[in-house]
């Protein structure tokens, strides 16, 4: 059995979650079981419907409505910490081949839980599990621990022209 790797998708460019979702699709089509935990997200993203179409995919959100434009509340911290505990349970059980911790880096940046808790979580990963961590501002400690790090760099974005987020493309 192969050892699962740790991958990080970070940076200020678009595509971190999208890349992780693409990898989830590939894994499911290869007969693997996938868990996605979305931190700081409680909004109605289109991918929330994916488990209805993709057997073997489980997706849970651990956030309220986005606080990105304001300070996180105590509820945001509690939801994130509950999510981290749930993800640990998923990883310890070892039933999923691929685990995606979407926007975990942002949760760390906003100090919703300590870095040490995440490092402990990573240690609980079953040997065969592939672990994907997404979000801007990946801390150096996670970058150092990862086997693969991809930084998405924004070169040009249509938001700058005033185009709002579109269903099925950005959410």
Image (cartoon, helix red, strand yellow):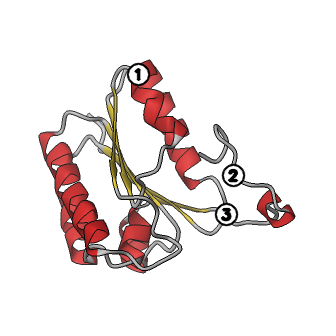
At 63% across and 69% down in the image, what residue appears? Answer: 12
Numbered circles on residues, count: 3
98 lies above or below 133: above
26 sits to left or right of 63: right
State which quarter of the image contains the N terminus: top left
Q: CA distance from mark 2 to mark 3?
A: 14 Å
**Nearer mark to the viewer, of 1 and 2:** 2
Check disc 3 and report the residue beneath it. 13
Which sits in the foreground, 142 or 87?
A: 87
Q: Quadrant of residue 147?
A: bottom left
Q: Which mark is residue 165?
A: 2
Which sits in the foreground, 106 or 99?
A: 106
Q: CA distance from mark 1 to mark 2?
A: 24 Å
Sequence-earlier tag: 1 or 3: 3
Q: Position of residue 105 (x, y in %)?
A: 42, 68
Check disc 1 and report the residue beneath it. 52
151 sits to left or right of 122: right
Secondary structure of residue under mark 3? loop
Sequence-earlier tag: 1 or 2: 1
- Residue 144 in sight in this render: yes
Secondary structure of residue under mark 2? loop
Which sits in the foreground, 47 or 93?
A: 47
């Amino acid at each position: 059995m192969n050892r699962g790797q740790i991958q990080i998708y970070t940076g200020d460019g678009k595509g971190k979650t999208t890349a992780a979702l693409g990898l989830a699709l590939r894994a499911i089509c290869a007969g693997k079981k996938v868990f996605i935990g979305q931190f700081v997200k409680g909004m109605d993203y289109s991918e929330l419907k994916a488990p209805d179409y993709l057997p073997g995919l489980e997706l849970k959100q651990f956030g309220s409505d986005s606080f990105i434009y304001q300070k996180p509340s105590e509820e945001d911290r509690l939801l994130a910490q509950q999510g981290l505990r749930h993800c640990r349970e998923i990883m310890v059980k070892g039933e999923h081949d691929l685990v995606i911790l979407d926007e975990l880096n942002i949760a760390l940046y906003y100090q919703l839980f300590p870095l040490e808790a995440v490092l402990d979580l990573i240690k609980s990963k079953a040997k065969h599990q592939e672990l994907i961590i997404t979000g801007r501002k990946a801390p150096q400690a996670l970058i150092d621990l990862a086997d693969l790090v991809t930084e998405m760099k924004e070169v040009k974005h249509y938001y700058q022209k005033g185009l709002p987020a579109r269903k099925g493309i950005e959410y």
